[in-house]
Amino acid sequence: MRIAIYFFISAFILMCTTRGLAQQAANEGGGTLPVTVNDAAHPCITPGQYAYLQQRINDNIARLHLDKRGYRTTASTTFAWPLMPATGLNDCSYYYIGNYVDEDVTTGIKDYNCGSVTYDGHRGTDICSAPYPFLKMDNNLLNVVAAAPGTIIEKSDGYFDKNCAMSSDTANYIIIQHADGSVALYWHMKKYSLTTKIVGQTVVTGEFLGVVGSSGSSTAPHLHFEVWKTTASADLNDPWTGTCNLLNPATWWIAQKPYTEPAVIKAQVNSIPVVLPGCDTTETPNEDTCFAPGASAKFYIFLRNETTGLVVHERIVNPDGSTFSNWVHNSTTNYLASYWFFTRTLPAIAGTYMYETVYNSDTCRYPFIVNCAALQTPSSLHSPEWSVYPNPATGQLHISATDCGNGAKVLLRNAIGQLILSDEIAPGSGQVAKTYALDGIPAGIYFITFESANMTETRKVIVTD
Ligand SMILES: [Zn+2]
């Protein structure tokens, strides 16, 4: 009996170790994120599915006479980015490219940039959700949106959406035909998340199509975005322009992103470690806002396209903007997506601090508070003190405020007074630090208003690209 129990405990420890949790007890560590993108043995769309799709598309077009409606009324199609963070997702970024189109018609691989970010026979661009892909899926935080206007010519929903391997399951997907006759496939979406629009209805650029998921033949939540020049699946296109793109001479992107985009996509501060269990279990970020003075905390960065030779500069910024402490992380290996953590002692003085990280000329910040209790004033008559930073702002805007015991409201308006963003701070909040994503908000002059029970104040904010 004793032997049996010992064996059981050993097996349990081994299981946890293989899941990568043991290293979390260390003061520093990290490595690759549980990156599991499809490969040649696990194609996003199987040959059988292509044949089925072609039949469905042909039937729908004939049934609804879709080729008679605005068919080829424009000469060309251009694409906006097909993912958009939902309200509530304020990370510095949310994706990495797992695979491009394979331009090599033989058994070799070659992406549009003559690199190897693809697998043999891959026909789309895999845009992967990161970090916390299952948490984002569970909470509907990352949306698939139409990259170009067009007509829905095929749609599928209701299939299982947490696959971790090749599957013959049908995905949840939408296929859109554009006015030039070309077609885009949006594949692997979350079950029952798709737009209620039906085959034959039209969509505009940026319109919600569904939530990023892992339905069909998929190894993690991602969007497989595939383009055809016509309604024939054989007429494959590759929207990325580059030396090795043999399918298409010019980019179809309105603003083609760089081949790789090294960046810190999220920074956070924790008292206890994050939990990254891998496919198909929901991750637990354990990020905190309030910390005890002088406590030990873990500072996390999540990187996209970590590149050997680049350096992450990290610092804890005092409330007055000076540096409390700083350190660097040297990249010694290339990763599609990686994470690192560093244990540091927090300041002893109460206040709002900033964890600031800079990588590849890109800055990602995470505000946090030391000694929340000391910063709360019991008197409800006390006016909140608030600050907005940085100003000018790029990518994200942060607000911190004290004495929000009666609750407050944050409103961002553009130069002509249109409401761009609004947020409620719940009563009893005391000291708060909030972050707002500026994705899709054009550069320009804005006005941010902070409203509470006993004060309203507006300040000018400049948003830059
Ligand atoms: Zn794919």
Image (cartoon, rainbow, N blue to C red):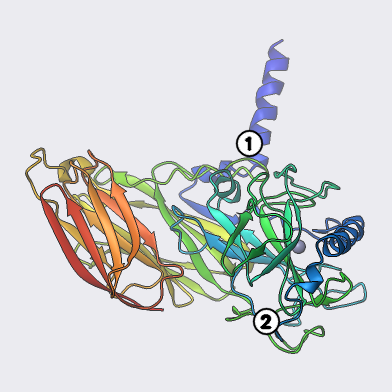
Q: Is residue 367 visible?
A: no
Q: Earlier in the sequence, mark 1 or mark 2?
A: 1
Mark 2 residue's CB less than 8 Å from ligand 1: no
Of 425 and 335, which appears nearest the observer? 425
Q: Quadrant of the C terminus?
A: bottom left
Of 4 and 432, which appears nearest the observer? 432
User: Above or below — where is 41 with respect to 193?
Assistant: below
Q: Quadrant of the N terminus?
A: top right
- Left or right, residue 270 beside residue 416: right
Q: Position of residue 160 (x, y in %)?
A: 74, 42
User: Above or below — where is 266 with respect to 166?
Assistant: below
- Mark 1 sits on what residue? 16
Choose top left, top right, bottom left or bottom right for residue 400.
Answer: bottom left
Residue 252: assigned label:
2
Q: Position of residue 172 (x, y in %)?
A: 73, 51
Residue 450: assigned label:
none
Circle 2 Cα neighbour tier, 10 Å, few/some/many (<14 / 14–19 / ≥20): some
At a point 45% along the width and 43% down the height, the residue shown is 286
Choose top left, top right, bottom left or bottom right for residue 5.
Answer: top right
Of 117 and 322, which appears nearest the observer? 117
Q: Position of residue 454 (x, y in %)?
A: 10, 49
**Amino acid type, callout 2:** Trp
At a point 66% along the width and 29% down the height, the residue shown is 12
- For numbered disc 2, what is the local secondary structure? loop
**Amino acid type, callout 1:** Cys
At a point 39% along the width and 43% down the height, the residue shown is 271
Of 195 and 172, which appears nearest the observer? 195
Figure quadrant, ligand 1:
bottom right
State the separation of the CA atoms marked 1 and 2.
Answer: 45 Å
